[in-house]
Amino acid sequence: MRKFVFLLAAMWAFVVVDAAAQTQQIRCFSHRGGRMEHDENTMEAFQASLDAGYHGFEVDLRMTADGELVVTHDSTLERTTNGKGIVEKTTAAELRKLRTKKGNKLIFLDELLEFLKPIKGLYVEFEMKTSPVEYYPEERLKEYCDKLYSAVMAARPDDAEYVFTSSDYRGLRYLQQIHPGVDLLMITSKPCNAETIDLALALGIKRIGCTMDGTSRQAVKKAHDKGLIVSLWPGYSPDDFMLGAYLGADFMCTDIPVQLKKFQTEKAPWLKVIY
């Protein structure tokens, strides 16, 4: 089905997207540092994306048992590391002894921020991984949000666009209450449609991260008309990127940053893409 949809999109691409190329601009960012090409959420991955020309990144953060923020996606350690157990029940010192399945060390927020500091024109999504909910009851959730916000904003370069994202709306609401004007993105596994648009408006959040499956150009236009910024996922292939462009996305993540940049440069140079 996805291939069929892409073929339809491709038929229109040179008509619709090329016609809009003078006005449409897409910001493409490296998801977990490009998890299908590199060792996700590691310095090796972020450096490889930077070397490929990317100044846009998405990173995942969890809090250790002793309150440090570590860059990792899963709450469990088994998929990505040589360890076992739960991140939130493991100390920072214990995590520093582990290695990923590809031999890289886990990195912590302070290391990531130091890496980002000299990069010009940054766009970074800091995804707040605060599920399962039982690992982040109210007080611990507040501690997590306070530590993340304070560290990130203290290290943010003047020209950087730093966005806090989550599918757990508790953290988004907390940051919104404590820091009015904070740049937030609501992640949903649903498409951009009337439901997700209305929810973002009700929450007072101007950015939505939706799945492309079920998203239409009309829905994205409606979101734009309501003043929302639309980010679409997934980004597994060049097909996904072209479909996102056809749908009118403002932002697109990619799991294949090197491959995608080469594809876009050679096959779709008329698209205005900021990496």
Image (cartoon, rainbow, N blue to C red):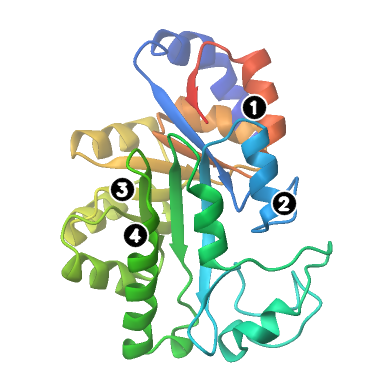
Q: Nearer the viewer, residue 52 or 224?
A: 52
Please tell me which residue is depicted at 38% across the width and 13% down the height of the picture.
Answer: 20
The three-letter code of the residue at mark 3 reads Arg
Give the Cα distance between marks 2 and 1: 18 Å
Q: Which residue is mark 1?
A: 261
Image height check: is 103 above or below 146?
A: above
Which of discs 2 and 1 lies nearer the camera? The answer is 2
The three-letter code of the residue at mark 2 reads Glu
Please tell me which residue is depicted at 25% across the width and 55% down the height of the picture.
Answer: 200
Query: Dot 4 lies on which element?
Result: helix
Q: Earlier in the sequence, mark 2 or mark 1?
A: 2
Which of discs 4 and 2 lies nearer the camera? The answer is 4
Does the rendering let one see residue 13?
A: yes
Q: Which mark is residue 44?
A: 2
Q: Residues within 10 Å of mark 3 (few under 14, many from 20)?
A: many
Which of discs 1 and 3 lies nearer the camera? The answer is 1
Q: Is residue 147 left or right of residue 203?
A: right
Please tell me which residue is depicted at 63% across the width and 17% down the height of the picture.
Answer: 265
Give the Cα distance between marks 4 and 2: 24 Å
The three-letter code of the residue at mark 4 reads Ala
Image height check: is 170 above or below 134?
A: above
Query: Dot 3 lies on which element?
Result: strand
Please tell me which residue is depicted at 31% across the width and 81% down the height of the picture.
Answer: 142
Q: Which residue is mark 3?
A: 207
Which of discs 4 and 1 lies nearer the camera? The answer is 4
Q: Earlier in the sequence, mark 4 or mark 3?
A: 4
Q: Position of residue 174 (x, y in %)?
A: 25, 73
Say which quadrant the N terminus sits in.
Answer: top right
Q: Nearer the viewer, residue 234 or 37?
A: 37
Q: Earlier in the sequence, mark 4 or mark 1?
A: 4
Q: Which residue is mark 4?
A: 154
